[in-house]
Every structure is written in C-alpha cells, then in structure tokens.
Image: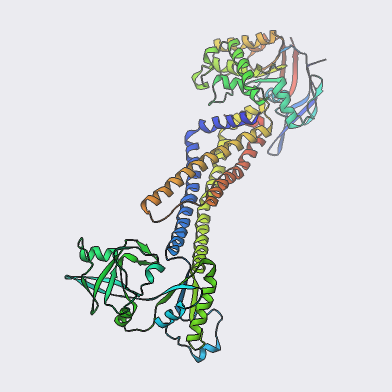
Amino acid sequence: MSLIELSAIERVFTLGDSEVHALHALDLAIAAGEYVAIMGPSGSGKSTLLNLLGLLDRPDAGRYRLEGRDVTTLSADEQARVRRERIGFVFQSFHLVPRLTAAENVALPLMLAGVAPAERAVRVARALADFGLADRAGHRPDQLSGGQRQRVAIARATIMRPAVILADEPTGNLDRATGEEVVRLLEALNAGGVTLLMVTHDAALGARARRRVVMQDGRKIADGA
Amino acid sequence: MTPLDTLRFATRAATGYPLRTFLMVLAMSIGVAAVVVLTALGDGARRYVVNEFASLGSNLVIVLPGRSETGGFNPANAVTSTPRDLTVDDAHAITRAPAVLRTAPLTVGTSEAAWGGKLRDVTIVGTTADYLKLRRIDLALGRFLPAEDPNAAVAVIGAKIQSELFGAEPGIGKVLRIGDRRVRVIGVLGATGQGLGMNADEVVILPVAVAQAMFDTNTLFRILVEAKGRPLIEQAKTQTLEIVKARHDGEEDVTVITQDAILATFDRILGTLTYGVAGIAAISLAVAGILVMNVMLVAVAQRTAEIGLLKALGAPGGAIRDAFLAEAALLSATGALLGYALGQLGAFGLRTAMPALPAYPPDWAVIAALGTALATGLLFGVMPARRAARLDAVQALAKR
C-alpha cells in the first residue's frame, strides 16, 4: 500500500473570467520512505500539488488517500489534526515566528498538540541538539544565520515525527554551501525512514532524489528514477 | 492547545509589539479612569450635599411661608391669594405640639457690620436661643443668645467675622454696629466652613425681634422644627401644619417639608447626575472597544504569514481564534486594571485638592467600568479573531 495515493486530481483556479487548470487528471502514488523531487517550471502546478499533499488546499475533483485513508472528505479540524501529526512542512522562507526564540518555534507543533510543557522542553532540547542548535535555543530568528533558521524550521517540521516531510524549495533562500548542508540534513532524515517530497526547479538538487516527478501545465509529464 | 498555552502565546504576541500594545492599553485605561473619576466626582457631590443636610440637625421639619401649588389652579386661592405672614408667635405655637421638641424662627437678611473703622457685608440671621441646640452648633467663645430676653441688643458672630473685624483680639464684649444699630458681641461660633450655600463663618446671629426690627418686617424666612425623635417626624409635620392652619384662619398657606424629603430629592437628583456622567464616560469605553477591534485587525493583517504557518503546523481554526481573542482580552484587562489604578489616583487627587468633597468612586461604577472594558474588548475582538481563523492557509503563507 502506498503512503500517498492521488487519483484523477483536478484543481482549477478562476482568475477573472478565465479558468486555470493548476492540476489536471493527476495520478500519483508514493510509497513510504521514498525520496521524491517534484520539478518543473514556475506555474507548472508543483506548488499547488505540494499544498494539496499538505492538506492546505482541497482538490476540485479526484481522491487523495494518505496512509490508506481518504483525507479529502475530512473536516477542516480533522485535516488540521492530520497536518499536525503526519505532515511536516519546510518552506523556502523558513516561516519562523519572529518574536519567538528558536526553542519556542520548534515547540509550536507540540504546543498546538497540547503536549505538557515539561515533556515539550525535553523533546525540543533533544531536537535542537540533534540539529546542532543547542547553543542557539534562546536566540530569536533575526539572530540566526539563514542555515540555522532553516535547521530550526526542519527541527520544527520533524518534532512530531511525521510520516512525510514536504519541502518547498528548501534551499531557495540559502547560498550553495548552506543549501547543501540543509539538503544533506533532509536526506539523512529520509534515510531514517521519513518520506521526503521536495519541490525544486534546481536540476542539480532534483538529480539527487531517487525519483523525479516532472510537472508541466498541471500535468505530470515524467515520473521515474 | 491548552488554555494556559493560548494565554502564554497571546502574552508573547502582545509583548512582541510593545508600542501597539501600549497605545491600546492606554486608550482602554483612559476610558476606565474617566468612568472612575467622573463617578467619584458625581457621587462625591451627592455625599457632600447629603452630609450638609445631615449637618443641619437631625429630625428636622422646616416650615416655609406660602403654599407650593402642584395641583394647578385652586379656586380657594382666587379668594385669598396673599399668604399670611409666618410669625414668631406661630413658632411659639408649634413648640406646644406633642411631637415637637423645640423650634427656632429664622429671619435672614444682609447688612453691614462695622467696628473700629472696618466695614464688611454680613449675613444677618435672626433667631432664638433654641437655634444653637437645634442646629447642633458649637460655640468657640462666650455664650449664645439669651433665652430670657428676646429683645437684647446682643450678637453672636461667625469665626470669620471675628478674625476679619477683630483679628487676634477677642470680639466678646465689643460693641458692633450693624446697620443703624449697636449690639454687644456675646459669643463667637466655631469655624465650620460651608453650610448649605450660607457660610456659617460669615453670619451675625441676632435675637429674632432685633433682626425683624432691623429689616422692618414681621414675617419669618423659615421656622425650623425639631421632632422629639426620628419616628415622630411625620407626626411633627402633621401637627405643625394643623397648628399653623388653625392660626391662619383655616388657610393652609405654608409649606411644611421634612429634611428626609429634601435629602431624598437631592440624593435622587445627584444620583441621576452620577449615572449621567458615568454614561458619558462609558462612551470613551466604547471608543476604546472600537480601537481594540482596529488594533486587532491590524494585528491579523500583520501576522497573516504567522497564521498561515500555524495552520500548516496543524492549528485548527478554533485555536487561532482563541489566541487572538485571548490577546484582545489580555489587552483590555490590562487596560482596565491600569485605568482603575489611574482612576483611583485621580479620585485621590480630587480628595486632596478638595478635602470637603468625599470623592470616592461608587462600587457599582467600578464594577461596571471594569466589566464594560472587558466586555467591549472581547466583543470587538471577536470579529478580528474570526477573520484570522478563516484565513486561507495557502494565501496566508504566501504573504511575507
């Protein structure tokens, strides 16, 4: 059984009086533990696909099964719960809360899940140590380098031990060396068993994935190793 | 998200934008402080008047010449429209009523008092010896009007008259010229300050017959009647009216009022006034409430990306709504408490500046002000919080 199973997905945006097919007749199956790069030019629908996979957006037609469960029909609050427990997001612009420290940012998903503060502190300290951020726990995002910020974001994305990590251009705002470091971190997580989906238009980055899905005009035009 | 976490998150959000938070807390606190200070002022005025009336003496019934008409045209008035004079003899007659302890006739006018080349306007009060006990007046020096000789050319002077005419010298024994008469000062009143629009420190008290002769009149300004006890006030009033009516050929040409009735009226008027100013001050609370909404809407716009992130991290709409609502409540509560402290400080300032005025904010006003502040803060916080909860996650995340 696949971890992710999309069948006949349609997503249409209405811009003024014209309709844009962001995703059209899309079928996609991803097994647990895979490392997939989603590639394609801008406007190809790869970000829409990622939002859909992350339950931030709903398809207009088709079915999305996550871990064998149809998640398209879930209520908003149930979808929030799935996002909280099964999905980790890593964004190009990090999306750290500027007024919170690194530790507090990492603790956000635990707080939303209602984990007790004492347990939260233990888990956050361990996660920060794992990502080499132990001495940065009390720093706010504006006191961290780009690489450190993205590592905080990755620590936050993985603190709930999700089944899948959705990374949207995770190296887009980083220099080459730092980007390389971040990608290695994500790959290490994948090696540990987490399914990794990475949206990128960087061919070199895409080439590192074991599977590449290439999108164009809302359709999948290539899929394979 | 646990309630404690929601509160902590809201606190961090509020302290994360200090200027915005400060301005909003300030607006809310001004509203609450306005209510507290203005009601303190209103209620202080009410208490002041009530106290002043109480200082008139207790169990008091007051007789005024003339009938206060409330029933429109009365045929009886067409026959005899001029009221008969209220006289000293009427006062003596009232004294014999069973429920009456003592009476004091009152004639009031203004004249000049002169001594040793100094001249000053004074209020002349013509009365009898019983006035002292009836009004619970303290004498600083000497004695009050003699009961045995109603025509004695003597005077009791107020504390200010003593100091202004005689200075440090004792005025007792001196002969004072009042108008065209000479009177010997036999007593000085203790300093009391303001009393019912008439400064008791600036009066000269003369025997009623002397005062009446001076003003060339037979009629009295008032007759003050003291009942034998509090439960007998109504009886004293009825008996007084009967006696005066019998003496005035069956004509009810005087008005008899009890101190309680006057007190209740003033209490009502000034109480209403206090509600009025509280209402006006409450408008500033409503304005502060609208400001809360404005500020929270700005906060939602400012933190759109953060809301998107929270949604991506799996926060249900309810949790986001609660966080923003908690922030609005927190700001309102802080503003309300600060305003309460400011208001109490203001009331303290009023009391310091005007020691005669018991400017304490009434409990109902304080509770209403704090309650309204919290309620408006929450009420006006609901709309922005709901807007935050309904934001589309994808669009919110796209915003920087």
**Whether residue B241 is visible:** yes
Front residue of A211 and B93: B93
Give above or below for B227 relative to A58.
below
Residue B87, can we see it?
A: no
Figure label count: 0
State the residue at coordinates (63%, 29%): B308
Q: Residue furthest bottom?
A: B79
Give percent across and percent down for residue B381.
Answer: 60, 41
Residue in view at x 58 percent, y 13 percent: A179
Which residue is rendered at x = 47% and y = 36% of the image? B19
Residue A157 % position (x, y): 65, 19
Q: Quadrant of the N terminus of chain B?
A: top right
**Residue nearer the viewer, B237 or A142:** B237
| The one of A16 and B98 positioned closer to us in this rendering | B98
Question: Would residue B187 be found to the left or right of residue B249 on screen?
Answer: left
Q: Work out which quarter of the rendered image holds the C terminus of chain B and state it.
A: top right
Q: Residue at x 55, y 24 (%)?
A: A100
Q: Quadrant of residue B189?
A: bottom left
Asked if residue B24 is positioned above or below residue A172 in the image, the reply reads below
Q: Is A45 placed above or below B203 here?
A: above
Look at the image and name its color scheme.
Answer: rainbow
User: Can you tell which quarter of the image residue B197 is in?
Assistant: bottom left
What is the x, y in percent for residue A58? 74, 30
Farthest residue to the left: give it. B117
